[in-house]
Image (cartoon, grey):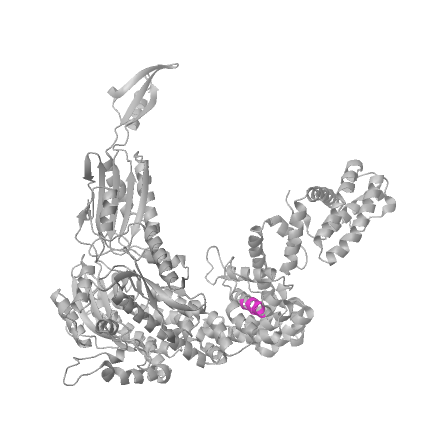
Amino acid sequence: MTDKPRSFQEIILRLQSYWAAKGCAVLQPYDMEVGAGTFHPATTLRSLGTKPWAAAYVQPSRRPTDGRYGENPNRLQHYYQYQVLIKPSPPDLQALYLGSLQAIGVDMDLHDIRFVEDDWESPTLGAWGLGWEVWCDGMEVSQFTYFQQVGGHDCHPVSGELTYGLERLAMYVLGVDHVMDMPYNDPDAIIPLKYADVFKQTEQEYSRWNFDIANTDVLLKQFEEAEVACADILEHPYEDPKTGTRIVMVHPAYDQAIKASHLFNLLDARGVISVTERQAYIGRVRALTKKCADAFVETDAGGWAAQ
Amino acid sequence: MPDLLIELFSEEIPARMQTRAAADLKRLVTDGLVEAGLTYASAGAFSTPRRLTLSVDGVLAHSPTTREERKGPRVDAPEKAIEGFLRGAGVSRDDLEVRDEKKGQVYFACIEKPGRPAADIIAQVLEKTIRNFPWPKSMRWGSDSLRWVRPLHSIICILNDEAGTSIVPLDIDGIAAGDRTEGHRFMGQDAFAVTSFEDYATKLKTAHVILSATDRADHIWADATNQAFAQGLEVVEDAALLAEVSGLVEWPVVLMGEIAEDFMGLPIEVLQTSMREHQKFFSVKNPKTGRIEKFITVANRETTDGGKTILAGNQKVLFARLSDAKFFWENDLRVPLTDMAAKLDNVTFHNKLGTQADRIRRIADLARELAKPVGAKPKLAVQAAQIAKADLSSEMVYEFPELQGLMGRYYAQAAELPQGVANACEQHYSPLGPSDDVPSEPTSVAVALADKIDTLTGFWSIDEKPTGSKDPFALRRAALGVIRLVLDNNVRLRLDRYVDSQLLRHNLQAGGDAMLQDMLDEIGDHGVFGAAIREVLERFDGEAPKAVRELETGLPDMSSNLLAFFHDRLKVYLKDRGITHDVIDACLAMPGNDDLTLLVKRAEALQAFMATDDGENLLQGVKRASNILTAEEKKDGVEYSYGADAKFAETDEERDLFKALAAAEAKIAPAVDAEDFATAMSAMATLRAPIDAFFDKVQVNTDNTTVRRNRLNLLSQIRTTCSSVADISKLEG
């Protein structure tokens, strides 16, 4: 196969072209700290309601507990996910997905691709779906989910969601054993950059901060502020007195829910949340996303006008 | 007679659901056919990751025509009655026959239900089956409302006989039944049509699908063991994993790979768990070294490079996984167990029961008390209790919760703690289920008992008892654990006392440690809670804090309620061992029933005795004595318990009974003291003949009041003597 990609970014670019060619709107990352691409409103909110939707995007994702100071070959507290959401899920979604693997240079004749049961549930999003983790030679390279419920709402129609863990997938395709050794741009570029050149230092900085330094009192306070703000925003009447139009402020409220969720992850990494408290925090975040979902289905994008 | 072939082709079905789903398909369809009158010769069901298949041979081509005759009203019955009959039978008057019966002429309706062609019935049954399929979890997809385990793509539903093959017409939400399917996702070619089950199975095989899960499992196991054997190694058996892996592949290809030397220092359970849980690899052991040196993975396809790329990929994933495990292991080894335990200060066990650290302190205190009765060294029991749960804050257990306890043992060994302490880390969770091994090392027993009693008393204190089918904190399991720990190790202890101690620890934190210690000391002195609390309350001279005053009434209730819970669990446990509930009730009525070992000793002796003729007859004799006695006592308003005197005996039978009683009592009392209940009961059995003779010849109620009273007192003595092992009035029979 001569068509192998040569760098991390080339894999991202190929995915972008592939899904663009399949008709997805190629969006950009959401400009907030999130734990996974699912949190992007293009997935969470757009999977609600009846309007058809097709989007693909890269989403930087943060998992504070996974920080390993840049030493572990595959664990990072900051990494990239590639996310595809199509509503309603097309009947050939599995084939489309396999096509995307071919597009990034996975030779279907040499590898063992498997769909292994993995029911997806996001307690903080009040969401669940059924699907698989996709294995390539024993390695999980993607998550494949048919959304059944989001924010406590049944999904009608059902969205098909694909999530690729980009670093892991790229390392495999490029034959790299340690993420930090992976070429970020073309190895023959004038200034070749490896993943380490871009991210090694930040992994160290954030690992230290996440595990030992982050001020938990401040984080707790911010969590509570975000919680209050989210509810406040949604309590405003839908009619905007200034413009006289109906403006439901779902996204600003949802931003606060995202914030609360990330703050919870940071607190978790600092080890200050006990097992029983954990459930309570998750419940609080879920209550926020649920409120946002309730509000979203009363907006145009959520199919409200159609009702 | 035609054969039926059904295939439901979908996206990948979870491995764990496939076998059950194939069986459900067979049951639902064949039951439906039979119910509609379509019998068949034989049926077989199959599953692969992408298909459920049912083959039914020898199906009737038509359901038989059925005839039903219904007797109606007499010809001269009122018009209304005849009309009602016509409506009910669904026939017109012309269809009625008139027959001569004894009572006159009567209408008969003959209702003929014509048979239906098999295809009609099958279509109906299959649609109903698909729409109501009992998947553990099902889903919708696209814009459809049909539910299936994953999106359903196509249906084969064909009937074939000598004349040829025909498709059963059926359409479910746009999926029309046909005769086409696909082979292996990657190794198969285009979709193909099939004409019969044989044709289907053959073509599938050509398209690289082994239809039978058993065949796939057999193939995997045979190939895996052969490959291992060739290198002098053996595959670690794992039936659940084999079943799961067989459900992940349509065309299994077994590959054996290396585990890098770097990871040989990891505990083998870590290697096995990591490989099984994350990668679904089999472990391959070197029988000479006992180490896990290789792994087996099962791919779903053949490749032109003989699986080289696939194996290399799997090896790489494993390397990363084990690097993680090694990272956890080495990090954990750097942290002293006491530091790990200290971290539990920040971990809530339950919001009303404090942190894990609080819990550990309570368990350690109770383990110290329990050390003596279980034969452990108090110092070791306390040390073990203090670190037994430390591994909960280790990185390895965070990653693999199922390794809790086991990692504790490894870390305690690495810290060179006494072996008994290390073992207690692993064993104190046991026994978890009714068939789980029970620890026998005294230190482990002390901590295991303390852990479970602490859990039970804790949840009893906050009124979170199990109700009906709800037992979220597994308290029934904890109580059974206590029972089995005590019985299997023949531990002698008064459970009540330790339950009271621990209830106090849970409830008296408000009063401060000093008061708690006072109270515990008092319990130690008095043995029971009631006297202890009065002692303590007196010291307050009426000014005791509310929490303490409330204990006086609340705690005994909790304590006896919990003891009753233990007794209920014990009944269930003993029932399985052949001891009936009335025997247990008879023994529970005796003092010291919180000493479970003693209780069971009694119960076993009584059960054995009751199985003999002597036991049964003696029981009848004593019951008779008791009934007469109770009746007379009621009538006279007195209790006859003064002791009978042989000098008032008038008959030989009376005198014999006096003698026999004296002789028996001389044996019974020391035997009961020595807990030799069998001897005590065989002594009681000697009373059977004299009691029978007494009732045969002697009339208790005579005019002579002295003699009568003496006889009643004698009966009372019989009852008392025969109740020295158990309250036999509670026995049935």
Is residue A213 covered in magenta?
no
Identify the residue at image location x=86%, y=44%. B648
Task: Count the labels in the image.
Answer: 0
Identify the magenta region: B443-451
Instruction: Tell me the quarter of the picture where residue B546 sits.
Output: bottom right
Q: Say left or right for B230 vs B568.
A: left
Q: Main secondary structure of the magenta part?
A: helix
Q: Is residue B14 above or below residue A137?
A: above
Q: Nearer the viewer, residue A88 or A104?
A: A104
Residue B673, x across and y down, in percent:
74, 58
Q: Is residue B487 above or below residue A76?
A: above
Q: Say left or right for B387 vs A284.
A: right
Q: Is residue A239 above or below residue B201?
A: below
Q: Nearer the viewer, residue A155 or B244?
A: B244
Q: Nearer the viewer, residue A301 or A21?
A: A21
Look at the image and tell me in which quarter the C terminus of chain B lies.
top right
Is residue B448 covered in magenta?
yes
Residue A203, x across and y down, in percent:
29, 82
Which residue is most to the right? B647
Q: Is residue A232 visible?
A: yes
Look at the image and tell me in which quarter the N terminus of chain B lies.
top left
Residue B40, x across and y down, in percent:
31, 36
Residue B298, x across and y down, in percent:
31, 61
Instruction: Tell me the quarter of the picture where residue B553 sits.
Output: bottom right
Instruction: Tell me the quarter of the picture where residue B711 sits.
Output: top right
Identify the residue at image location x=14%, y=70%. A3
Q: Say left or right for B714 vs B581.
A: right
Q: Is residue B545 visible?
A: no
Q: Is residue B185 above or below residue B124?
A: below
